[in-house]
Amino acid sequence: MAAVATFSPDGLWLSTSVCEGATCPLATSVGVRWGRWADGAEPAEAQAGHAAALVDLRRQLGPHVTERVCLAGAGYGAARPRPQELASTAALACVFLQGTALLSVRTREGFTSLLCEAGDWVLLPAGVPHVFDAGEAPDASFLRLSAGGRGWFPENTGMALPCALPVMDTFVEQLLHALGEDIEDSEA
């Protein structure tokens, strides 16, 4: 299950929905494809590329480079830099093996943010401006499949992000509040 939210160009929260099926219409409407590969599949199976979703993603990307990315750390505290908006000249897929991450995409209407968890995959077309954030104390692992033979070489778009657009930890806190869940209860 992925949570998706839309934001104004100023970063103000507009709407929230949950993707529970095989697709996420709101993500698709901004050019991003989302799905689940897991639901019973082992991470080792996903890494080997035998899960049906990975076979389909590999087919869509054509020739590509696969990298395993592990993000772990104690966090930056107050000195944590704000994630930067990037764009890649090649299509990009991320297959989440562990943890959570927030993917925010700039749209004509503002921003669409997708909270992904282990078992989710996302496919970004080439050139889509996006922000990837694994939180202040990241503990995430994913496969990054980059179309072409060079690997992932994004460029910073140079576009400023609105201060009100939440980073991952704030997004999760606001999402739980919007869904009426007590944050302390969700961490237990």
Image: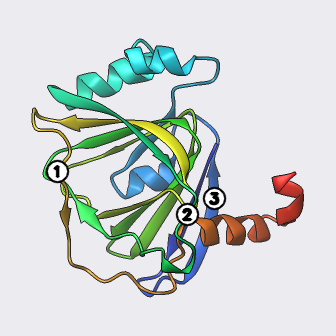
Q: Compare residues 69 and 161 and report the one nearer the observer.
A: 69
Amino acid residing under circle 3: Ser
**Is residue 181 in sight in this rendering?**
no
Amino acid residing under circle 2: Gly
Tell whether 181 sits left or right of 155: right
Q: Position of residue 44 (x, y in %)?
A: 50, 16
Tell whether 53 sits left or right of 101: left
The CA distance from mark 1 to mark 2 is 24 Å
The CA distance from mark 2 to mark 3 is 29 Å
Tell whether 1 sits left or right of 72: right
Q: Position of residue 63 (x, y in %)?
A: 14, 25
**Is residue 60 in sight in this rendering?**
yes
**Which residue is found at the position 49% from the left and 63% from the top?**
113
Up-down relation of residue 44 to residue 179 (above or below): above
Q: Position of residue 119 (x, y in %)?
A: 56, 32
Residue at numbered disc 3: 17
What secondary structure is marked by label 3?
Answer: strand
Disc on the earlier residue, 1 or 3: 3
Disc on the earlier residue, 1 or 2: 2
Colouring used for the render: rainbow
Amino acid residing under circle 1: Phe
The CA distance from mark 1 to mark 3 is 31 Å
What secondary structure is marked by label 1?
Answer: loop
